[in-house]
Amino acid sequence: MEAWVKSAIHALLAALALPKVGLPAIFLISLASATLLPLGSEPAVFAYVRIAPHMFWPAILVATAGNTVGGIITYAMGAGAESAYQAWSKKRQSSTGEPAHAPPPGGRWHDLTTRWFQRFGPPVLLLSWLPGVGDPLCAVAGWLRLPLGPSIVYMAIGKCLRYIAMTEMLMHAWPWVRHWM
């Protein structure tokens, strides 16, 4: 690896170092991890709380805020995708004479989530914290145009409970993990 690449990587890591930047880094990492990017924010929250235990609640609240904003972005992406799909359907209908609304994308995942959202509504977003499932749930909520306010509330509750549980679990398990290292 070239020296300038190593230097740039080290500069980036130094800029994002938790003791220096702290809560803004937690916010950005949590926001990025709540979009469709495969990134976990729990290790960053745990590391920060491990360094500064008195910052447990501020770290949890900032991580929840960042992760919720990321969920809102994913919700907006789902709503935008649905709008683009509707525009495409109308354009297709005008050029081919087919029905204005082509059937939406189907499949087992689509059918299952649509039924869940139709039955339970925004409370399904309490599950938005689940790895691999939570981000698509936020996108589907946007696609289905669930009410934004309640969707945000349920996203935030689920994500906050996840950060509390994961951080507490890691804090209590840390002495055992460290012993085995």
Image: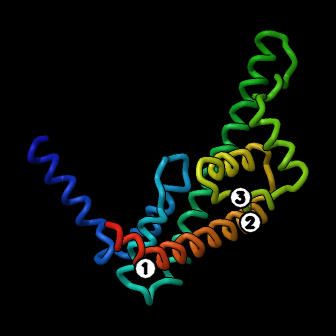
Q: Are marks 3 and 2 in contact (CB under 8 Å)?
A: no
Amino acid residing under circle 2 = Tyr
Rendered image: mark on residue 176: none
Identify which residue, 176 or 167, lies in the foreground.
176
- The quarter of the picture where the N terminus appears is top left
Q: Which residue is mark 2?
A: 154
Mark 3 nearby-residue class (10 Å; few <14, some 14–19, many ≥20): some
For mark 2, give the secondary structure. helix
Residue 64 vertical position relative to residue 103 in the rendered view, above or below:
below
- Spatial CA distance of label 2 from label 1 is 25 Å
Rendered image: mark on residue 49: 1
Specify the quadrant of the image occupied by residue 124.
bottom right
Amino acid residing under circle 3 = Leu
Residue visible at 33% across and 72% down? 18
Residue visible at 55% across and 70% down? 166
For mark 3, give the secondary structure. helix
Rendered image: mark on residue 127: 3
Q: Are marks 3 and 1 in contact (CB under 8 Å)?
A: no
Query: Mark 3 or 1 closer to N-term?
Result: 1
Amino acid residing under circle 1 = Val
For mark 1, give the secondary structure. helix
Give the number of the mark in front: 3 or 2.
3
Query: Mark 3 or 2 closer to N-term?
Result: 3
